[in-house]
Image (cartoon, helix red, strand yellow):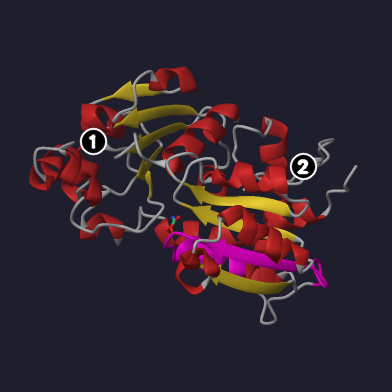
Amino acid sequence: MEKIKKTNIIWDKKDLLGLEELSAGEIELILKTAISFKEISERSIKKVPALRGKTIAHLFLEPSTRTRISFELAAKRLSADTIGISGSGSSILKGETMRDTAQNIEAMKVDMIILRHSASGSAHILAKNLKAGVINAGDGCHEHPTQALLDMFTIKEKLGAIKGKKVSIIGDIKHSRVARSNIIGLCKLGAEVTVCAPKTLMPIEIEKMGCKRTYSLEEAMRSADVINVLRLQKERQKKGLLPTIREYIEEYGVTLQKVEKFCKKNIVIMHPGPINRGIEMSQDVADSDKAVILEQVTNGIAIRMAVMFLLSQYKQK
Ligand code: CP
């Protein structure tokens, strides 16, 4: 891990909506802040008083395991009071809008709202209409900033730096908010990013984001220091984007045989989860010592603690 360098960057944002809105310096500030928060989760008493007296609402209107639990644990380890609201347990089912729900939560003097939503741009709508801080925990196909931040933190921890490292993102690039946030963040910090997918799962003009494209898994694996493998969103099958899942596995499934044949010896293998074992990644790769998937999950708490801490420092002008 790189030593923490002194930085002149001051956090002055109420919300974290995406990595598109952040400068390289702001991304680095979050990564540096997370280093000091990581150690707290190693203690027997995993708590600091940084957010004592603050209330954080977790508004998760789309399924989540990792992100929801990670945000909740991060808030609790900072001593914030937390409430969890799901779509099925709220008045959204009776027709209340997301904005009305959030404004009612804010009226109860909640300081920060963490939102997961299936619609792209939903976090931006909340941020515009609330004084409370808003953190995007994944909005449709748009962005998943804390996932990309924890991925970058893990790369830095494993390789010592991000600048100049070659990262291949493999899988359903077209529908992936994780891919978008990773491409944006990694390019801002000077990594060389290649995306790899079948043509039907590759966005047009993806190179405009600053990455390279390839349709060859072998090429994506050969060049990489890191491969980040994305979930094949099986629900897309119904839309005829792939002939069959079997053919996807043959062409793009990451197996131990392909890793041993094409990848560098010290390759770092990542997956944001949830994994479809045996589809985008074989069982033996997911469980191999090259995979850092559970380390990514551990690092997620430190990143989310850092983000919530920095947002809590924001002063309304
Ligand atoms: N990586 C991720 O966002 O996982 P969840 O959908 O379980 O939160």
Which residue ends up furthest to the front in the rendered image? Answer: 95
Taking the spot 79% from the left edge, 66% from the top edge, the residue there is 109
Which residue ends up furthest to the bottom in the rendered image? Answer: 44
Q: Is residue 312 left or right of residue 183?
A: right
Describe the element under mark 1 as helix, strand or loop: helix
Q: Which residue is mark 2?
A: 13
The image shows residue 120, relative to residue 41, as above or below, that is: above
Q: Crowdedness of circle 1 by 10 Å Cα count: few (<14), some, many (20+)?
A: some
Tell me residue 56's x, y (percent): 70, 66
How many callouts does the rendering have? Answer: 2
Taking the spot 58% from the left edge, 72% from the top edge, the residue there is 84
- CA separation, marks 2 and 1? 43 Å
The amino acid type found where label 1 is placed reads Phe
**First to last magenta residue range:** 49-72
Tell me residue 133's x, y (percent): 73, 52
**Which one is earlier in the sequence, the residue at label 2 or at label 1?**
2
Q: Which residue is mark 1?
A: 262
The image shows residue 187, relative to residue 129, as above or below, that is: above
Q: Quadrant of residue 114?
A: bottom right
Describe the element under mark 2 as helix, strand or loop: loop
Taking the spot 83% from the left edge, 40% from the top edge, the residue there is 10
